[in-house]
Amino acid sequence: MFNIELKDVSKSYGDNEVLHDINLSIEPGSFTAIVGRSGCGKSTLLRVIAQLEEISKGTLSFSSNSGSKPKIRIMFQDDRLIPWKSIIKNIELGAINNEVAEQSLQKVGLIDKKTDWPDQLSGGQKQRIALARALASNPDILLFDEPLGALDALTRIEMQNLIEGLWQQQEFTSLLVTHDVTEAVRLADRVIVIDKGTIQLDEKIDLPRPRERDEKFTYYEQKILNQILGG
Ligand SMILES: Nc1ncnc2c1ncn2[C@@H]1O[C@H](COP(=O)(O)OP(=O)(O)OP(=O)(O)O)[C@@H](O)[C@H]1O
């Protein structure tokens, strides 16, 4: 299990400094949500952690007892399935073998779709397949870049429950970028609010699971929303 450590991390695109001196330590197996206004740098932070972007300043490190490198997977708003491969073949791309791919498909409840083509599935089903593909590789760290943003409200809640359940089972470290504060409070142990490339609020969510939208839940929602809107 890996600790993710960012020290004084900045990221610029030309003259545009998108992240400024970010200091962040993320514990192994934790679930962190990153929220903030559009364009505040959420996705950039995720891509930096995924090492899809080079940082301009500071250090990013992953520490563990084993000394090995973490396996990091990322899930996007679009499913990124390969249209000319069947569902099971898509999942096998992430899996060690066929058996693991089938288990993963079972976990997301779509084993009966294994010989279908991506085009034959709904948007919600395709996102479940994308999740199955990411999980089939048994990642240490799973990054979610607004993966539920295009789904209808009911499918979204179903997916949230699925992600929560699988995270509890497989114990990977989760980082979720979302616009939806309710989603962040429902899923995360910790919610980070970013504005203008810096961390404005780092809130521990101290609620039992599964979470109910009770008084304490709405307290967190309101506090986080106020920070985003007022910050
Ligand atoms: N590849 C890039 N080249 C240049 N500028 C970029 C690049 N990627 C992002 N940016 C800029 O960095 C800033 C932050 O973008 P980012 O995608 O991280 O924001 P975000 O908070 O995820 O936004 P949204 O919620 O709208 O997805 C924006 O001003 C954006 O234009």
Image: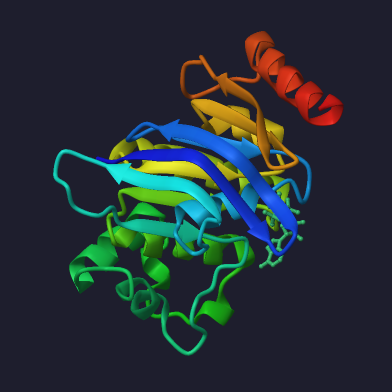
Residue at the farthest top position: 215
Indicate left or right for 56 with 103 as reference: right
Ligand 1 lies in quarter: bottom right
Q: Is residue 46 visible?
A: yes
**Residue 71 at what x, y percent from top left?**
30, 57
Of the pair 230 and 22, the residue shown nearer to us: 22
Q: Residue at x 75, y 41 (%)?
A: 196
Q: Residue at x 52, y 78 (%)?
A: 118
Residue at the farthest left position: 66
* Quadrant location, the C terminus: top right
Of the pair 71 and 48, the residue shown nearer to us: 48
**Residue 76 at what x, y percent from top left?**
57, 61
Residue at the farthest bottom position: 84
Q: How many marks?
A: 0
Q: Residue at x 63, y 36 (%)?
A: 183
Q: Residue at x 26, y 59 (%)?
A: 103
**Residue 37 at what x, y percent from top left?**
78, 42
Residue at the farthest right position: 230
Task: From this view, report whether residue 211 is shown above or below residue 103.
Answer: above
Of the pair 131 and 53, the residue shown nearer to us: 53
Q: How is the image coloured?
A: rainbow
**Residue 191 at what x, y percent from top left?**
58, 29
Task: From this view, report whether residue 138 is shown above or below residue 27.
Answer: below
Q: Is residue 146 visible?
A: no
* Quadrant location, the N terminus: top left
